[in-house]
Amino acid sequence: MADNSVLTSTTGRTSLADSSIFDSKVTETSKENLFTGSTSCVEEEMPQIETRMILVQEAGKHEELIKAMKEIKVPFVKMKSIEQFEGLDSPEFENVFIVMDFQDSVFNDLYKADCRVIGPPVVFNCAQKGEPLPFSCRPLYCTSMMNLVLCFTGFRKKEELVRLVTLVHHMGGVIRKDFNSKVTHLVANCTQGEKCRVAVSLGTPIMKPEWIYKAWERRNEQDFCAAVDDFQNEFKVPPFQDCVLSFLGFSDEEKTNMEEMTEMQGGNCLPVGDERCTHLIVEENIVKELPFEPLEKLYVVKQEWFWGSIQMDARAGETMYLYEKANTPELKKSVSLLSLHTPNSNRKRRRLKETLAQLSRETDMSPFPPQTPKSCTKSSKNSTPVPQKQSARWQVAKELYQTESNYVNILATIIQLFQVPLEEEGQRGGPILAPEEIKTIFGSIPDIFDVHTKIKDDLEDLIINWDESKSIGDIFLKYSKDLVRIYPPFVNFFEMSKETIIKCEKQKPRFHAFLKINQAKPECGRQSLVELLIRPVQRLPSVALLLNDLKKHTVDENPDKSTLEKAIGSLKEVMTHINEDKRKTEAQKQIFDVVYEVDGCPANLLSSHRSLVQRVETISLGEHPCDRGEQVTLFLFNDCLEIARKRHKVIGTFRSPHGQTRPPASLKHIHLMPLSQIKKVLNIRETEDCHNAFALLVRPPTEQANVLLSFQMTSEELPKENWLKMLCRHVANTICKADAENLIYMADPESFEVNTKDMDSTLSKASRAIKKTSKKVTRAFSFSKTPKRALRRALMTSLSSVEGRSPPSSDKHVMSRLSSTSSLAGIPSPSLVSLPSFFERRSHTLSRSTTHLI
C-alpha cells in the first residue's frame, strides 16, 4: 500500500497528494534551476495542488454524504454525467471521485481513465473519526480490510482469483504473492500446500474465500472490520477440511465422539481400510501393530494429531505425529518372568519365590511419575540412606515422605501442564478459557503446592538425617495454620470446579482437545483433570492415617509421640472444618449397610472421607486370606479394602434400640486392609484350567516378606479387567501415584500355581465341607480353656453339618448367648493391622487360628 501524504494549503483546507509525485517534482525543479534552496523556496516555486471531491451522479443527491463532506472541510462539486469529466480536469486540483456503486459503467470508465475513486463509507468513516481522507492509488470503496495483508493459495481459476483480489483492494487490503511473516491472513481454496503448513506454524488464520465475499456484502456498514474475531471465526478453514479420517483402537464411545468432532471440524469419516481415507488415527497405547499395510498417501498418525489440530483450530503437521510401532522390552521381560514353567514342583516353588522377589524389587522402585515439570520442582538431594536395621517407625516415615513427594509432583503437573498453558497470553486461536473459568477450576492449587513443597523438603531433610528422636509431628504443626487457610477454599468449591470442567469440555471443543492432549501425556498417568484435582480432597485424610500409623510405632518415651497426637488433632480440625458441608448422606448409608452386613466389621470403617466404590464376589484360590474355596466378598473403598467371607451359619438377628429388626449379618470380617499395602495387581491369564482369576501382592511397611492373595471372580456383571483397573486407580490415588496402569501385571496361572478347575466340582465341595467340620471338632477338643457350652455347641454344629440337619431349637438360645459373649472376649480388632501378623497367627496351630477367626 502506498504511503499517504496530507498537504495543508495556505487557505487551511486539507489536500491529498502522492508523496512520490511530490518528491519527483522537487527533484526536477532542483535540476532545472541548479541550486539548493530551502523547503520554503521549493514551495514557492511549486503550485499548490488542492484536493477536490467530485460527487458522481447519485452521490450528489445523498444528503448525509454532502453533510459528511462539509464536516471534513474538503471542497466538492457534483458531476451529473460522464460528459462533464473533461471540463472538470484542471492542473490546480487533485480530483477524487465519489461513486455510489463500484459495479456500474461510470465506475468502469473512471477506473480506465486512471482516476482516483472512493466510496461513501470512506467519507463517513473519516467524518466520524475526524481524520483526513486516505490516499489510495486503487479504487477504495470502504476500509473494512484496511491494514490487512492477504495471501492466496489453492486457486486454479484465474477469474475467481482476480475477483477476490479486486474486492480486497476495494476494501483497503493489500495482496502479497509470497507468504511471509507480514501476511495477516491466508485465503485458501484447499489445505494441502506449503503456504498452509507455514501459516499453521506461524499461527496465521487460514480463511475461506467466503470471508471476502461476506465482508463485501457488509461494505456499507459503518465501523465494520473484517478482522474482528466474531466475524472471521465464522469463515476460518476448519482443521479437517479436505480430510477423510478413520479411527483404530478406540472404544465405541470414544470413536463416536471423535467422529462427531470430525464432522464439526469440516472432515468426513470412513471405516478403517477404505482407500479414500487420507488419515488413520491410531490409539498408540492399545494398537501395537497395524492390521494392514497402509498406502503411501495415507497418513498414519497418533491421536495427539487429532486433538492438537482441534486445539490449534488448524490442521497440524502430520510429520510430528506419525505413528510408530511401540517397543516395550520391560513389559516383555516382566511377562516372560511371570511365565516361567517347569514340571518339577520344587523348582516351581523356587521359581515362584524368585518371581515374587522380582516383583518386590520392582515395587521398591520410586513411585514418582516418570516426568515432572522442571519449573515446579527442586533438584532432589542425595538418595535416602537406608539404616542397617529398618525400624517400623522409619518405614512409615519413609512412606510418608514418598507419598508427599508424589503428591507435590502431581500438583506440579496440574499447574504446569494445565493451568499455566491456559493462562498464557497470545494463545493460538485465542484464549481457550475465560479467566474466571480458570480461577474457578484451579482455585488455590498454587498455594497448596507451595505449602506442601515446604513440607516435602522438611521431610526429606528428616529422612536423610534420620534419627529415632526426630520429630515428624512438629513439621505438620508448623504448617497447620497454612493448611487451614488453603484447603477449605479449594475443597468446598471442588464440586463447582468439577462442574465447570464438564460444562466447558462439552461446550468448547478446543478445551476438550486440550484436555485430551495433556491427559495422554506420561506425567498424567492417563488420568483426567478431574481425577487429578481430587487429590487435594484426599490428601489430608491419607496423611492423618499415616501419622496415626507412625504414632503406633513410636515408643512412649519418644517426645514425638505427644507431638504426633497434636498433629493428628490439627489435621482432624482441618478435615472437620472442610467436611461440615461436604458429607454425602448416600455414601454414608452405603458404609452403614456394609457394617451391618459384615459381622465384626471395625467401627473405624465409618469415616466422613470414605466412600464405597465397588463390591465384588469372589472365591479364595489359596490359603490366604482364608481357606481355598471359601466365598469371599471384597468391598473396595476409596482408601481401603474390606475382606469378608461368607458365614457358615447365620445365628440370631440384630435388633436396633428402636425395636426394628435387621437381617442377620451374612458375612464374617477377615481383614480391613489399607490400599497402600497392595504393591502389585496380577491379572491371571485366561486358560482352560483358570478362569476369571486375579491375585494381589501385599506387603505392609513394617515387613519385608510379600504375601500373595489369589481370588476367582464369580459375578458376571463386572468384567475382570474393569475391576482391576478400578482397583489400581484407587491404589494409585491412595499412594499419590499417577501411573496406575503400572500396578497391573499379566501373569500365567502356572507361575503362581493358580487354577479354578475344581472350584465347582461336587467332590471339591464335599472336601471343603469335611475340612470345615474337622476344624470345628479340632477347635472343640483343643487344650485351650474352652467353656463347656462352647464345646457342646461345636459338637452339635459339627454333627448337624455332617448329617445335614440344623441344631434343635432348644440349643439356639445357648448358641445365641455364646455368640454375644464371644464378642466381648476382648479380642483385639484386626482393622488396619499389619497383614503378615494376621497370617502369622494363622500359621500357628489350627486350633489357635480358628479360635481367633471364627
Image: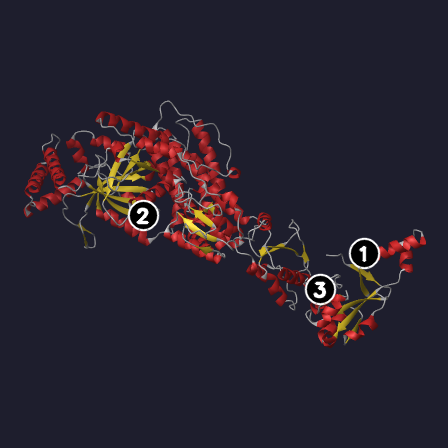
- Looking at the picture, how far across and down is residue 253, in whole percent? 38, 53
Label 3 and label 1: CA atoms lie apart by: 19 Å
Element type where label 3 sits in the image = loop
What residue is disc 2 on? 613
Tell me how far mark 3 sits from mark 2, CA to CA.
Answer: 69 Å
Judge by depth and name the residue closer to the eye, 596 or 531: 531
Q: Earlier in the sequence, mark 2 or mark 1?
A: 1
218 or 410, which is in the foreground? Answer: 218
Tell me: 48 left or right of 216.
right
Q: Secondary structure at mark 2?
A: strand
Pointer 1 residue: 20
Label 3 or label 2, whichever lies nearer to me, is 3
Q: Quadrant of the C terminus?
A: top left
Crowd rating for badge 1 (residues with CA inside 10 Å; few <14, some 14–19, many 20+): few
Q: Are marks 3 and 1 in contact (CB under 8 Å)?
A: no
Which element carries disc 1, helix, strand or loop? Answer: helix
The kind of residue tagged 3 is Leu
- Of residue 784 and residue 495, the one placed in the foreground of this image is 495
The quadrant of the picture occupied by the N terminus is bottom right
Whether residue 581 can be seen here: no
Which label was assigned to residue 140?
A: 3
Amino acid of disc 1: Ser
> Few, some or many C-alpha atoms within 10 Å of disc 2 (few <14, some 14-19, many ≥20)?
some
Measure how far apart labels 2 and 1 are at the Cα level. 80 Å
Task: Say whether disc 3 or disc 1 marks the residue closer to the N-terminus.
Answer: 1
User: The disc labelled 2 sits on which kind of residue?
Assistant: Val
Mark seen at residue 408: none
Q: Position of residue 152 (x, y in %)?
A: 62, 55
- Sequence-first tag of 3 and 2: 3
- Residue 150 horizontal/vertical position (percent): 65, 56
Horizontal side of residue 259 vs 113, given as left or right: left
